[in-house]
Amino acid sequence: MRITFLVRNIWGIGGTIKTTINTAEALVERGHDVTLVSCIRNREVPDFDIDPRITVDSLWDVRKPGDGGERLSFMDRRRAKRDSYLDRAQVNNMRESSALFDRRVKQFMEKVDTDILVTTQVTLNLYAARYARPDTIVVGQEHLYLDNYKPPVRQLIKDNYHRLHSIVTITESDARAYREALPDCADRIAVIPNSIPAHRGELSTQNEPMIMAAGRLAKMKGFNTLIEAFGEIAHRYPEWGMRIYGRGTERKRLQQLIGEYGLRARIKLMGPVSPLDDEWSKASIAAVTSHYEAFGLVIVEAMSAGLAVVSSAVEHGPIEIIDHEENGLLFESKNVEALSQALARLMDDRELRCRLAEAGRVTARAYEPEQVVGLHEELFERMLKEHA
C-alpha cells in the first residue's frame, strides 16, 4: 500500500511524532510505500532518526531563507498574517497557524495521491474533513483524548469527524467517549495503541541509585511534583539522585525549585536527548508525573528498558498500561506525599523494583511496532476494500 502520514512538525520532539515514525518504519519493513508529510519544517535535522526508506516532505519551510527556508511571495506574507479559520475555536496552538497554513494544507489535500492518508492530530483531522477529496481514504488518528478538548473544539469534532473514513484512538476509554459522542460513526472507531520499539541498549541492573524522568518541561507533566516529592525525602537517601530529560518553558522554574531544596548536585535537568536508550540503563526507577496523559510512551519505554515505573493514576494511558503493584506503582496525581511514599518504597526495596521491572518488560512487548503494525494494516486493508 501507499500510505501517507500528515503531521504538524516531524522535525520536533514529542510522543505523537515518535510513535508516527515508529509506525511508518514498521510499515516500510513490511514492504509498504510510506511518506511522512510535515506541515512545517523548522530545522535542518529532525530530533528523531527516520529510516531513509521513508520519503519525508514538508508543506512550509519556516526557516530563514539563508538557512534553507523558503522566501514567501507578497500574497503568502499577507496570508501568514491572517488568522486560520480554526483560530476562533483555538484549535491549532502552533504559532504558524494562519490563512497561509490553511492554504498549504488545502493544496496538499487537493493533490495528494495515496491509497491511505493518515492525519495525526485534531487540527489535521478537521482539515481533512473539510479539504480532502471524496476519493481520498482518510484515517484520522487521535493522540490526545476527547475530554481534553475545550467545548468549541469538541463541537467541531462532533460536527466534522463523520466525514473521516475511520477514527483511531489510542485507548479503549477514549474510544468509548468517541462512540458516545459520535453514535453514527461508532462502527468506524478503532483502537490502536501507540508503539515503541524494543529497548536496544543495556537493561537497568536495578543497582543504580537514580530516578529518571523524561518529557516536555511543561506544567502538565508535573515535574514540580516529582522534585518536591524527592526533595521531602532526599535527606533519607543521600546516595540517590534524579535526572530529568527534556526541554520546555518550565526549565527555569524547575531549576529554581531544585535550588530551593538545595539539591542542585543531585537533581539534574539534562536537556533533550534522543534516543534515550543509553540513558535508561543508568537509572533504576522511572517517574511519570503527568496531570493527564493520553497514552504514555515514556511508561512503555522505561518498562522495556527494565526500570521500575511509578506513575500518576490518570486517564487514559497510565491506568490502562499499569496494574498497580503488578507492573508498576500508581499514585494520586499532584499528591506530593503519595509520590514520596511510592518513591521511598522503591528506593528501599530492590526486590520490589526487580519484580515490577520484570512484569513491566512483559507489558512493553505488547506495544512493540511488530505487534501493533498488523492492526494498522488490517484497518487500512479494510478501508480499501470497503471503498473500492
Image: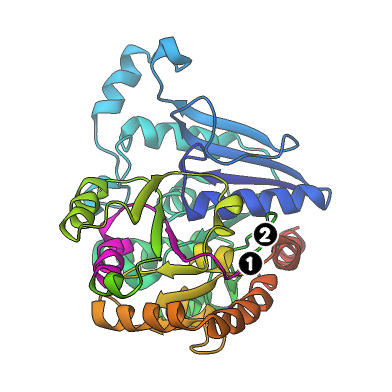
> Within the image, what quadrant is residue 365 found in?
bottom right
Q: Secondary structure at mark 1?
A: helix
Point 50% across, 32% down: residue: 107
Residue 48, compared with residue 243, is above or below; it is: above
Residue at mark 2 to residue at mark 1: CA–CA distance: 5 Å
Q: Residue 343: percent from the left, percent from the top?
A: 38, 77
Give, as a three-letter code, the residue at label 2: His
The image shows residue 277, relative to residue 165, as above or below, that is above
Q: Is residue 223 magenta?
A: yes
For residue 190, which quarter of the picture? Answer: bottom right
Residue 247 placement (x, y as % from top left): 36, 45
**Magenta segment range?**
205-231
- Give the residue number, with chain letter if any, for mark 2: 199
Q: Nearer the viewer, residue 21 or 38?
A: 21
Coordinates of residue 42 in the picture (x, y in percent)? 43, 29
Tag 2–tag 1 contact (CB < 8 Å): yes
Q: Is residue 31 left or right of residue 188?
A: right
- In this view, the residue in front, 261 or 166, is 261
Q: Is residue 377 magenta?
A: no
Residue 201 seen in the figure: yes
Mark 1 crowdedness (10 Å alpha carbons): few <14, some 14-19, many ≥20: many
